[in-house]
Image (cartoon, rainbow, N blue to C red):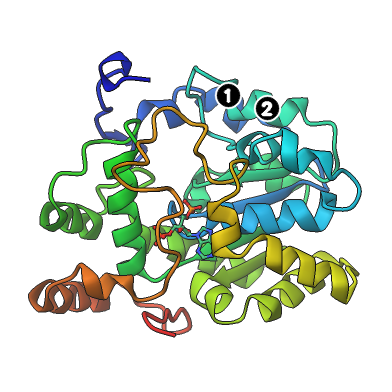
Amino acid sequence: MENKELPPRPQLIDFHGVSMIDCFTDNWENIQNFQARPDDILIATYPKAGTTWVSYILDLLYFGQTAPERQTSLPIYERVPFLESNFHVIPSGTELANKLTTTPRLIKTHFPIQFVPKSFWEQNCRARNVARNAKDNAVSYFHFDRMNKMEPEPGDWNNFLQRFMDGKMVFGSWYDHVTGWWEKKQTNSNIHYMFYEDMVEDTRRELDRLCSFLGLSSSEEEKERVKLGTQFDNMKNNNMVNYSTIPVMDFKTSPFMRKGKVGDWKNHFTVAQSEKFDEDYKKKMKKPTLQFRTVV
Ligand code: A3P
């Protein structure tokens, strides 16, 4: 699709105190009335924290053996519906989720905790959150907004970084998002909180933890297969998970599977930007138990 056929980039709106864009809010009523089922699994993340990686891991753990044809016939965004999405070119997230006949349903959301439909809590669904250190998260988000024409114009890196610090991003403030889910986890044992850095450091260890949280008794062989299939290079080359089939994404500007590293922020932040960011971070992040690593 040529750029000229695309609608203009969206503008940020303030939605119940969170910066959002229309395509994630205009199906609000259906989203809030969404009927979760007890065995649904919610994959909750701030954008660019490793959502697709964990989605694919879960899809392989649950369906890699029983429905292998899924892997080659359905792109990941149909296997794991994006709850709040309403892009008009494909069915909305709620429609896709309601159409799923497989169990468990794997459902993705970038919502901050206060926007999650209440039925997920009423049904005691399990949720796993992945969070990524703020600096790498900001860098990944910047490149994503450059290449994804459905996102607001990113502007230059310096302005983008200021917007990130101000929480003026689609899905709001990173700081509020990771803290909100962290607080909820303290009183809800159905939430498994994972860190992108831990997954990069030792994917197999994190897979074991995930299986234990989900009560899955996958064999050693199976877990090794999942680990191999979800390695960065394998996902980058897999058209069913690398988003290359989405016309609004311009892979010449930046691929969706970009680097997959911890510490790429060092290639983007100047010393002055890093110092300013760290100062601001200390003021915003007051939970001593929630610690991120910016290197592994
Ligand atoms: P980078 O832009 O830093 O490369 P999301 O799926 O939430 O949009 O997150 C995308 C980020 O996760 C991108 O980060 C992408 O490269 C990274 N990612 C995806 N699959 C990965 C994998 N198997 N291993 C490491 N990083 C991965």
Q: Residues within 10 Å of mark 2 (few under 14, many from 20)?
A: some
Q: Residue 106: x and y, percent?
A: 72, 45
Density class for disc 1 (Cα within 10 Å; few <14, some 14-19, many ≥20) is: many
Quadrant location of the C terminus in the rendered image: bottom left
Q: Is residue 240 above or below residue 7?
A: below
Indicate the quadrant where residue 262 lies: bottom left
Q: Disc 1 marks which amino acid?
A: Ser
Q: Quadrant of the N terminus?
A: top left
Residue farthest top in this picture: 5
Residue underneath mark 2: 96
Measuring from the top left, give residue 49's x and y in whole percent: 47, 60
In depth, the one of 6 and 212 nearer the eye is 6
Q: Is residue 28 above or below residue 222?
A: above
- Whether residue 193 is situated above or below residue 145 in the rendered picture: below
Name the residue that disc number 1 marks: 92
Q: Is residue 144 left or right of residue 98?
A: left
Amino acid beneath label 2: Leu
Q: How far apart in space, not on screen, are marks 1 and 2 (Cα)?
A: 6 Å
- Residue 189: horizontal and vertical position, in percent? 72, 68
Is 179 left or right of 250, judged from the image as shown?
A: right
Q: Secondary structure at mark 1?
A: loop
The residue sitting at 60% across, 58% down in the picture is 234
Q: Is residue 186 left or right of residue 220?
A: left
Q: Are marks 1 and 2 in contact (CB under 8 Å)?
A: yes
Taking depth in this image into account, of 182 and 153 the one nearest to the observer is 153
Say if residue 189 shows up in the picture. no
Relative depth, front residue between 93 and 18: 93
